[in-house]
Amino acid sequence: MALIQYISRIQFDFGAVSLLAEEIARLGLKRPLLVTDKGVAAAGILDRVLDAAKPSQPVVYKGTTENPTEQSLLACLDLWAEQGCDGLIALGGGSPIDLSKAVALLASHGGNLADYNVKTGGSEKIGKVAPQIAIPTAAGTGAEIGRACVMSLLDGSKMVAVNLNMVADTIICDPELTLTLPASLTAATGIDAFSHGVEAAMSTMVNPPAEAIALDCVARAAKWLPVAVQDGQNRQARWEMMMAALEGGMCLQKGLGGAHAMGTPLGELHLHHGRLIGVLLPHIVRFNAEVAQAAQARIRTAAAVPDEMALEDWITDFTRSLGLPTTLGEMGVPTDILPQIATRAEADHLTLTNPRKPIMADYLKMLQSAM
């Protein structure tokens, strides 16, 4: 069993979930709220985790939607108050983990989630939040170690709160929990992890340790994601992809870029984030090429891209080989919303760390090309 203490306390290996009771006791939790979704429950993973939590008996919320909503947040806060909860266990993909962060934030700070929007400077007000344990069941978002919480508000808009104080106190990464993840979701979540490495490596923020982690994320995902998609029972591939996802979350400290700036508003169409990012990533790589030659050369080396191929073309082929869409048209995105998406992408905080600063017209051109 590997105990990694970097950004947070991380228990990583097959069987790591068996340490849950020990980690609950270490944090002194008496009545944790376990946030998950119906898919995780139906797969039998929830029962396994509840058994590992004994003698603790967490209060369970299973209503998390694919893109977490403020409505779910309010329901969790009601449950928190009614049951006298004192901490959280997030179980699932990025959605339950982000929802858990939002509950931890408002349970400790009060107010409305919009008060902590990074775009309005609200995230700077975030101090220590309620204690959390995060247990990912997919290898993709890196939300378990990420400092951001993305949520759809009651009015349908998406907002992001970003602060290192929201990172879970303890993270339990057990690749065993990903063995039954379908190939389509393995691909969609895995391409998101890969994109974190690519965009962080190109980011303008100076953070050499995070860049090294980003490039290792790229190397692992490029090699092992196709194996995990082809053979979900391949234990080494599942271990490597859970590590790639964790690294993708670690390197978020360096910032992302334009693919995620476009992906956030497009996500309001209730489209899977990873599939969107897989479509958008080659376009921002092409846009950045003239100013990010050194970073892209390092990415090419990490991913073992053939010399004769453009990096963006290799990424498109890689995405297609995983059975994922490579155009927004395939995903049903209507063309008439593209100007609005481009405007919102320009205003997104992730545009600030893209190596070449896109304006609305640049984003619109990329989105039209991605159609």
Image (spheres, rainbow, N blue to C red):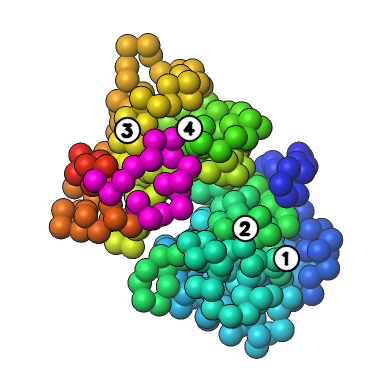
Q: Secondary structure at mark 1?
A: loop
Q: Earlier along the polypeptide chain: callout 1 or callout 4? A: 1
What distance separates the C-alpha of mark 1 from that of mark 4?
30 Å
Question: Relative to 42, is 334 on the left or the right?
Answer: left
Which residue is label 3 attached to?
A: 287
The disc placed on residue 202 is 4
Q: Secondary structure at mark 4?
A: helix
What distance separates the C-alpha of mark 3 from that of mark 1?
38 Å
Please name the amino acid that badge 2 sits on.
Asn
Which residue is label 1 attached to?
A: 128
- Nearest the viewer among 233 and 228 is 228
Give the residue at x 32% y 17%: 309
CB of mark 1 within 8 Å of CB of mark 4?
no
Which residue is label 2 attached to?
A: 163
Q: Earlier along the polypeptide chain: callout 3 or callout 4? A: 4
Whether residue 16 is visible to the viewer of this picture, yes or no, is no
Please name the amino acid that badge 3 sits on.
Phe
Please name the amino acid that badge 1 sits on.
Lys
CA neighbours of label 2 inside 10 A, class few (<14), some (14 to 19), many (20+): some
What distance separates the C-alpha of mark 2 from that of mark 3?
29 Å
Q: Earlier along the polypeptide chain: callout 2 or callout 3? A: 2
Q: Residue furthest top?
A: 307
What distance separates the C-alpha of mark 3 from that of mark 4?
12 Å
Q: Earlier along the polypeptide chain: callout 1 or callout 2? A: 1
Magenta residues, as a range?
A: 345-361
| Residue 358 covered by magenta stretch | yes
- Horizontal and vertical percent for residue 324? 31, 40
